[in-house]
Image (cartoon, rainbow, N blue to C red):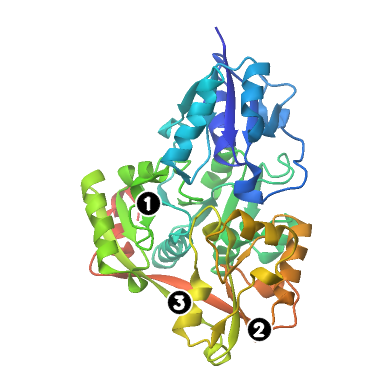
Amino acid sequence: MTRRVVIMGAAGRDFQDFNSVFREDDDHEVVAFTQTFSQNIGELDEIPERTYPASLAGENYPDGVPILPESELETIVEERDVDEVVLSYSDLSHEYVMNQASRAISAGADFRLVGTRMMYEADIPVVAVDAVRTGCGKSQAARKLASILREETDKEVIVVREPMPYGDLENQRVQRFETLEDLERHDVTIEEREEYEHHIEEGHVVYAGVDYEDILAEVEEEADILLWDGGNNELPFYVPDVHFVLADPHRPGHELRYHPGEANLRIADYVVINKENTANEEDIQTIVDNVESANPDAGIIHADSVITVEDEAAVKDARVLAVEDGPTLTHGGTSVGAASIAAEQFGAGEVVDPRPHAVGSIADVFEDYDHLGNVLPAMGYSEQQLAELEQSIANVDCDVVLAGTPIDLSKIVDVDTPIVRVRYEIEERGDLDFEAVLEEHADVLGL
């Protein structure tokens, strides 16, 4: 008998699991997606009604698939006679995963995780960059690897980024970003801009979207090597030939306590321990020990996250507002980011507390994530939220805004206070570095 399925997601891996595993499977019928909108797009006053469209869902789903709030999971299981609940989103504590399993089981359904079978096989080599948690430094690593491959070989390298499709899914089926104007054309959110802009500035073409089988077909026509740039701590969507996984010594032990980050750790070819220049030796060793226990065959690359600012003199002794990457602070669980570290490193006089000045949904973020202190997460998933971010920044009495996001914040907010951009690059330590790894795998990569 056909098993009726609900896929729990957050506008990303859930669509990949559907497309690769369930779309053409006559033994299963996906009767709904659920989405936890708070993880990726912030708390909303009104949950939008969405449908995974028939044009993407395939001939088995002429009406598409409804996308419903995760908060209604138990009711959905009962009313839609669901046999199986599939959890398909990332950066979740193991305890949280089992909480969702308990919800499904208590409602009368089985509970399931999809593993590596959702990965597509590519006809060109794949270098994958993933992590054990959000905010470990994937962007730095992926950017450097793409640049090495592009500059030191005669190969065409295309970056494929994990999806963040929060708009019109049909229009976002396959997206190609080559210029900064493409970001405007596709009307991207701040989160999307943070992941695409730094690649574009380096001259890298980026693909993203909804249907990663269609994306692969286009990339294979254009590129010699596909560089996968993962989101959160998600598994790669393509079978990697070389797989790098980032770990964060500021959160030692998290590499074994979050899903699917631990799975990434266990299947990595190389684990990159980043940010060692600002971490304790004891915490670095904790990660080394955990890697050697969970994945003894993995090579370990030690690395620093080197932070610079565009105008050091503007930061010295100044009263600064630290604006940080939103997802790293929120569901990534960190309390500081690159701007906070830059403020200390370059001698700021004071880091001003933004919390009394936050408005609207930005104020709600501080209520929802009470671990946050003197940092302002750069949330901007809608025009309204972007306006509230701009107003929150404008409300703060400071000398300088330190922008620790991967983007040029001055292009999306208009405030009177000078904005000083913080940049961060990964620098490997020791003989085992990215170039040595790529050389070691030259045959499989076609170098």
Q: Secondary structure at mark 2?
A: loop
The CA span between labels 3 and 2 is 22 Å
Q: Residues within 10 Å of mark 2 (few under 14, many from 20)?
A: some
Residue nearer the viewer, 365 or 124: 365
Task: From this view, report whether residue 263 is shown above or below residue 315.
Answer: above
Q: Earlier in the sequence, mark 1 or mark 3?
A: 1
Q: What's the residue type where badge 1 is placed?
A: His
Q: Looking at the rendering, in which quadrant would you find the N terminus?
A: top right
Can residue 19 be seen at all in this image of the molecule? yes
Left or right of residue 394: residue 133: left
Task: From this view, report whether residue 140 is shown above or below residue 306.
Answer: above
Which residue is denoted by mark 2 in the rendering?
A: 398
Q: Earlier in the sequence, mark 2 or mark 1?
A: 1
Q: Residues within 10 Å of mark 3 (few under 14, many from 20)?
A: some
Which residue is denoted by mark 1 in the rendering?
A: 254
Mark toward the viewer: 3 or 2: 2
Mark toward the viewer: 1 or 3: 1
Which residue is denoted by mark 3 in the rendering?
A: 307
Which x, y percent locates residue 218?
58, 44
Q: Secondary structure at mark 3?
A: strand
Residue nearer the viewer, 190 or 145: 190
Q: Residue furthest top?
A: 1
Q: What's the residue type where badge 2 is placed?
A: Cys
Residue 117 figure quarter = top left
The CA span between labels 2 and 1 is 35 Å
Task: From this view, report whether residue 164 is shown above or below residue 121.
Answer: below
Q: What's the residue type where badge 3 is placed?
A: Ile
Residue nearer the viewer, 423 or 329: 329
Which x, y percent locates residue 392?
72, 70
Q: Residues within 10 Å of mark 1 (few under 14, many from 20)?
A: some
Can residue 119 be seen at all in this image of the molecule? no
